[in-house]
Image (tube, grey):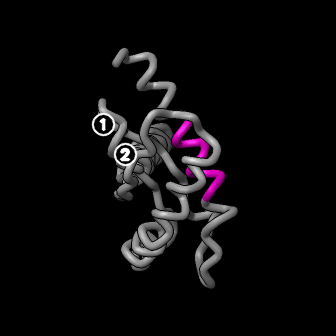
């Protein structure tokens, strides 16, 4: 299957799953604002899809939120089957995407270094 087609399918699945979260997952205590569907990686045969989600501000509850998503896997698959016309409806599996958290950490380090350099420059100028 061509790379362009896989990219389009992954993007369609990402959008459909992100939209489906708001319609399907209605568990008490589920924080929609904390969950972002970042990437979808579909197998070439369209039978499996890894859904990468970023969960912010819930360091302790990440696994619980991931379990809630997994419990609604079949409902999300049914929504995909209903709205997208593809040969197979992939079996979804959810994983935590650490890339956004890593990016935030890098930005914090850069900001900290810049702040330290400004402080050092201010001290050198006053002497």
> Alpha-carbon neighbours of circle 2 within 10 Å: few (<14), some, or many (≥20)?
some
**Which residue appears at 50% of the width and 43% of the height?**
122
Dividing the image into 4 quarters, which one contains the C terminus? top left
Element type at marker 1? loop
**Which residue appears at 38% of the width and 58% of the height?**
94
Query: Mark 2 to mark 1: distance in Å?
Result: 6 Å
Q: Nearer the viewer, residue 73 or 119?
A: 73
Marks 2/1 in contact by CB < 8 Å: the verdict is yes
Q: Quadrant of residue 43?
A: top left
> Alpha-carbon neighbours of circle 1 within 10 Å: few (<14), some, or many (≥20)?
some
Judged from this view, the residue extending furthest toward the front is: 87
Mark identifier at residue 49 = 2
Dividing the image into 4 quarters, which one contains the N terminus? top left
Q: Quick check: is 64 in the magenta stretch?
A: no
**Which residue appears at 33% of the width and 42% of the height?**
47
Residue 112 to residue 58: above or below: above
Mark identifier at residue 28 = none
Question: In this view of the protein, can residue 120 be seen by the observer?
Answer: no
Judged from this view, the residue extending furthest toward the bottom is: 28
Residue 68 position within the rendered picture, expressed as x and y whole percent measured from the top left: 47, 74
In the image, the segment drawn in magenta is 11-20
Q: Quick check: is 14 in the magenta stretch?
A: yes
Residue 26 position within the rendered picture, expressed as x and y whole percent measured from the top left: 65, 75
- Look at mark 1 in the image and give the residue it sits on: 43
Residue 4 position within the rendered picture, expressed as x and y whole percent measured from the top left: 44, 16
Q: Nearer the viewer, residue 108 or 104?
A: 104
Residue 12 position within the rendered picture, expressed as x and y whole percent measured from the top left: 56, 35
């Amino acid at each position: 299957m061509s790379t362009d087609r896989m990219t389009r399918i992954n993007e369609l699945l990402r959008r459909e799953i992100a939209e489906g979260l708001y319609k399907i997952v209605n568990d008490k205590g589920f924080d929609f604002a904390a969950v972002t569907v970042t990437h979808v990686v579909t197998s070439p045969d369209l039978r499996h899809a890894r859904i990468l989600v970023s969960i912010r501000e819930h360091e302790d509850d990440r696994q619980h939120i991931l379990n809630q998503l997994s419990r609604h896997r079949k409902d999300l698959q049914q929504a995909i089957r209903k709205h997208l016309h593809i040969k197979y409806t992939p079996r979804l599996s959810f994983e935590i995407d650490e890339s956004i958290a890593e990016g935030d950490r890098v930005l914090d380090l850069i900001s900290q270094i810049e702040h330290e350099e400004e402080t050092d420059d201010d001290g050198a100028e006053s002497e």
